[in-house]
Amino acid sequence: MVWRQSRYRWLLLAGAAALLALALRLRQPGSTGQGFYDYNIRVLELLGRATGLGYVLVSLLMGVLVPGVAAAMLLLVPRRWALALWAGFGLLLLGYFGLGARFVG
């Protein structure tokens, strides 16, 4: 996003700060790191069973293909759509976790 529109450099700083805070949080004893990992495994297993694709294929799609397509789209869309597309991907990610929490939790 920052590469496409330099006026959003604050996003890079905010994202880096958020990642640093998350990394520090996950390194602390009693953190949610293992719980987050277990949650993702359960969601991928559920999606694998629901779609009939299986855990391995769904995890490859969600971990390799989807981020690759998202990055390519962010690089290829016109600049005026890049921020909206980036925000849309963020909402989809929240939806993935929200839907997973509803079915797994």
Image (cartoon, grey):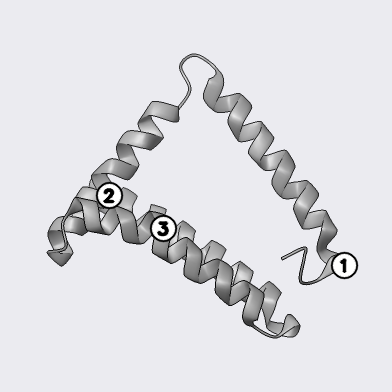
Contact, mark 1 vs mark 3 (Cβ under 8 Å): no
Point out the tag, 3 or 2, that comes first from the N-terminus.
Answer: 2
Whether residue 41 sits left or right of residue 90 in the image: it is: left
- Numbered circle sitting on residue 104: none
**The residue under label 1 is which amino acid type?**
Arg
Local secondary structure at mark 1: helix
Disc 1 vs disc 3: which is toward the camera? 3
Q: What amino acid does circle 2 point to?
A: Val
Q: Identify the residue at horizontal 24%, vertical 58% (top origin).
A: 57
Circle 3 is placed at which residue position? 64
* Residue located beneath label 1 in the image: 7
Q: Tell whether 27 sits left or right of 17.
A: left
* Quarter of the picture holding the N terminus: bottom right
Query: Which sits earlier in the primary sequence, circle 1 or circle 3?
Result: 1
The alpha-carbon separation of the residues under discs 1 and 3 comes to 29 Å
Q: Looking at the picture, how far across and down is residue 10, in whole percent? A: 83, 55
Q: Which mark is residue 43?
A: 2
